[in-house]
Image: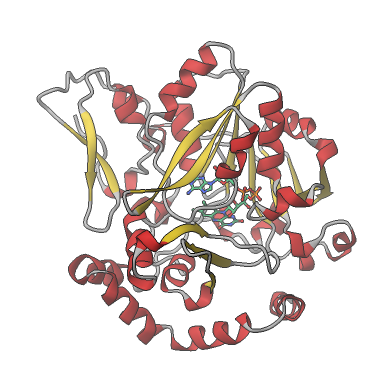
């Protein structure tokens, strides 16, 4: 059995391993830290289930956008802990109040590294773990199997993840469930967890001294800024343009191979709704700024089918919405139309990383991103309103 013809055909949703009746599929990790399933031919009985459930290779998506909004949670605390407008958390809370289970990505410190993986929660007190973007590939582990069990028991399940993980779940289940709701998040690509952990270890020295890393810190407003918290109560902000990890991430240099031909970077999204940052809201809907607080963050919501309409109706009273359009959102989120283009340094950077470790990546970044580092260092010193003003000029 061949699991995938080449690396651009596998997104590591782990659906094949979870369906295999003989436990014949394990994981193989490349030198750059990307995980691929591998098959043990001694155990394989050629049943073909692994192929059948592979949405990435074999299942077409037929959803298309029905309604589009700029939106944000009314509750400011929810927005503060979320990357953009807090739509995920509002919906998750509602599902938990309906005694449902909510699945999403969490980040935990284990054995001196950060582990990012999907987990189900049934208690509102755990919701914070799922909030906020973690800009690496989250491991699905056995979530699809668990979800199938819950669905068959009649439990309501909300699954959230990047589009290939949502499609992977649908492929694994191979049938529709009325009690399953799916939210996909706009994604331009995922780096490996190993690359991220090596960045932290190299740049901030002992990983064991750090107790938390937030990929999106909003204490200064809605922007791309990270925050690192040390065990001794100190913390540090990381302006993304000065950080090698963030710059290479945003510049599409370090993604998994399939991200560069992602089939979900289109109008045909696997989620019942799609959520993302509404970048460029000040240009697309200048009048909305009296209703939506830009500094607290604004999301976009794309309703992809009738189930999406239903789940949006569940939270209608808890969010502010402004009607928008797919093309307006896509103006600053090109990954709604086409996959990210592979950065021109992608191969060089991953080769350097594999052969010489993260130190070589940092040296490369310092050499090739001099102008950007300088501009972002200056920008990071400006107050938030001035940065917003400059951003609006750039968007004109
Ligand atoms: C790898 C990645 C790339 C992204 N790229 C874009 C982009 O190009 N444009 C854009 O507009 N938005 C992008 N986003 C989404 C954006 O950062 C916010 O998550 C989104 O706006 C929702 O915000 P929120 O305030 O509603 O919820 P939040 O609380 O911020 O988001 C939480 C949701 O994100 C999910 N999540 C977090 N990390 C991961 C992960 N590693 N893998 C899978 N799911 C995860 C959680 O399960 C939960 O559903 C990306 C997110 C990730 C993880």
Percent of width and height locating residue 146: 44, 22
Image mark count: 0
Residue 151 falls in image quadrant? top right
**Which residue is more in the foreground, 146 or 333?**
146
Is residue 92 among the parts visible in the rendering?
yes
Residue 360 falls in image quadrant? bottom left
**Which residue is more in the foreground, 340 or 60?**
340
**Which residue is more in the foreground, 224 or 203?**
203
Name which residue lies at 85% across and 37% down: 317
Position above or below: 37 against 261: above
Is residue 263 among the parts visible in the rendering?
no
Left or right: 254 with respect to 186?
Answer: left
Percent of width and height locating residue 375: 56, 86
Residue 157 falls in image quadrant? top right
Name which residue lies at 70% across and 36% down: 91
In the rendered view, how is the structure colored?
secondary structure
Percent of width and height locating residue 17: 30, 29
**Which residue is more in the foreground, 60 or 220?**
220
Name which residue lies at 82% across and 62% down: 285
Percent of width and height locating residue 50: 30, 26
Q: Residue furthest left?
A: 42
Looking at the rendered image, the quarter that the N terminus falls into is top left
Name which residue lies at 62% across and 19% down: 179
Q: Residue furthest top?
A: 153
């Amino acid at each position: 059995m061949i699991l995938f013809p080449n690396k651009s055909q596998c997104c590591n949703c782990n659906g094949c391993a979870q369906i295999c009746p003989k436990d014949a599929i394990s994981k193989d990790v490349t030198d750059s830290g990307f995980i691929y399933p591998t098959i043990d031919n001694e155990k394989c009985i050629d049943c073909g289930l692994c192929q059948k459930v592979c949405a990435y290779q074999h299942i077409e998506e037929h959803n298309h956008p029905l309604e589009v909004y700029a939106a944000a949670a009314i509750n400011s605390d929810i927005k503060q802990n979320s990357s953009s407008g807090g739509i995920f958390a509002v919906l998750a809370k509602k599902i938990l109040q309906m005694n449902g289970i909510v699945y999403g990505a969490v980040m935990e410190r284990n054995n001196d590294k950060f582990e990012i993986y999907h987990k189900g929660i049934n208690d509102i007190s755990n919701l914070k773990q799922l909030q906020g973007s973690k800009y690496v590939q989250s491991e699905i582990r056995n979530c699809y199997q668990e979800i199938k069990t819950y669905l068959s028991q009649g439990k309501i399940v909300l699954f959230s993840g990047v589009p290939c993980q949502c499609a992977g779940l649908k492929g694994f289940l191979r049938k529709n469930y009325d009690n399953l709701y799916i939210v996909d998040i706009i994604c331009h690509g995922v780096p490996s967890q190993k690359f991220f952990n090596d960045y932290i270890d190299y740049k901030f020295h002992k990983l064991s001294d750090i107790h938390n890393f937030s990929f999106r810190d909003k204490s200064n407003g809605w922007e791309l800024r990270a925050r690192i918290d040390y065990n001794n109560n100190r913390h540090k902000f990381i302006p993304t343009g000065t950080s090698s990890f963030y710059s290479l991430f945003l510049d599409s240099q370090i993604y998994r191979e399939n991200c560069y031909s992602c089939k979900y970077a289109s109008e045909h999204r696997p989620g019942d709704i799609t959520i993302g940052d509404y970048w460029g809201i000040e240009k697309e809907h200048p009048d909305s700024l009296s209703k939506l607080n830009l500094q607290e963050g604004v999301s976009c919501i794309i309703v992809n089918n009738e189930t999406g309409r239903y789940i949006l109706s569940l939270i209608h009273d808890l969010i502010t919405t402004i009607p928008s359009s797919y093309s307006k959102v896509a103006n600053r989120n090109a990954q709604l139309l086409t996959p990210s283009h592979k950065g021109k340094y992608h191969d060089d950077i991953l080769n350097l990383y594999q052969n010489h470790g993260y130190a070589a990546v940092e040296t490369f970044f310092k050499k090739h991103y001099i102008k950007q580092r300088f501009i972002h260092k200056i920008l990071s010193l400006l107050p938030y309103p001035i940065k917003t003003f400059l951003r609006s000029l750039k968007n004109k």
